[in-house]
Amino acid sequence: MVHLPPLASLLAFDALYHSGSVTGAAHQLGRTHSAVSKQLHQLQDLAGVALFEKHGSGVRLTPEGQKFAIVVSASLADIRRGYAEVTRSRKQQTVSIKVSSTFARVWAIPIVARFNRHHPDIEIQITLTVPQNSHAIDGSVDLVLSWDRLVSPMEAHPNATTLGDVHIGPVLSPTYGYSIEGGAFRFRTRINRRGSETGWERWSELTGLRIVSETQQTFELAGLAYEAAERGMGVALAPKFLVEKELKSGTLVAPAGFYCFREGLVVRPSSERPQPSPAARIFLDWLSSHGRLGDDGYLAADVLDPVWG
């Protein structure tokens, strides 16, 4: 079997062939002139045949070198085409997930950033839900993530992978007026997010604490509802992990506590794509180990750590 010369020397020879000079070859390869010259002479010494010769202040290929350069160039072109095809098919692996805008900002983007460090060949595309009927329509995505067990019970999510407990409760500004007495939680304005208005009644049933409010205000997005509560406009229902920053800083408080839905954060294949693709299965398996909420209902510490590897 004929032993091949080092690939680096063949690349240098190919670059010399296409550029016409050692200087041009060095520029094309991003190497120094001396490094390319050394590789060219190494190739010529191994071949035992003059492949190039001095010509003025530079070099030119000999007839033997010209003939070999054509073979090398064609072979490297085939390798480059084959490698491009392999990497193109790898890069085309995409997984689309559907989440709310607030969920995307607080949970999905940090999670996807971590996943990309493990699997840079898989692209996670984030699709946002619409407020109306967002609990009932999956759309053309691979995976659906859901946390609101008040309006979307676990039965609505068959074949789901669970990612930890979800703690949901009323949150409000520490300066906002309220009272809790006689089994009732009283305040002036109930803040809703569109499509989840019935969550208050369900939370009351589960906790046994009656909700008494005078007025209601509805926002299209969860993030707007939480911000309105933070600014003292009323009381909103929220999961701990989506308002963690506000709760820990004290700009939101939860005097009535939280109801815990065991393993309430779920991810599942969409109804339109019930059989996960290989890439979606990789993401699901990774989430099972790296995407779970902490036992306290907040994001795990490594989710928040931008340098976690």
Image: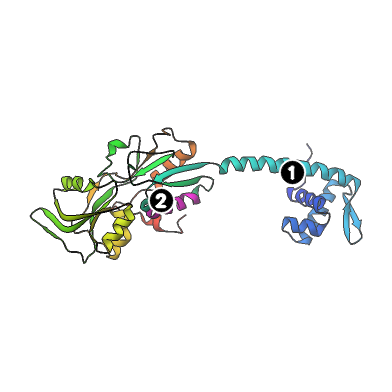
| Residue 295 place in picture, x, y as percent | 29, 51
Q: Amino acid at mark 2?
A: Ala
Q: Which mark is residue 44?
A: none
* Mark 2 vs mark 1: in front: 2
Query: Badge 2 is on which residue?
Result: 108
**Residue furthest bottom as drawn:** 175
Occupied quadrant, residue 106? bottom left
Look at the picture and state if 21 lies above or below 264.
below
Q: Does dot 2 land on a helix, a strand or a loop?
A: helix
Look at the picture and state if 82 lies above or below 227.
above
Q: Residue at x 42, y 54 (%)?
A: 110
Quick one: 153 or 63, which is closer to the camera? 153
Taking the image as shown, residue 123 lies to the left or right of residue 265, namely right
Q: Which mark is residue 76?
A: 1
| Residue 134 place in picture, x, y as percent | 34, 43
| Residue 302 place in picture, x, y as percent | 40, 55
Magenta stretch bounds: 105-117
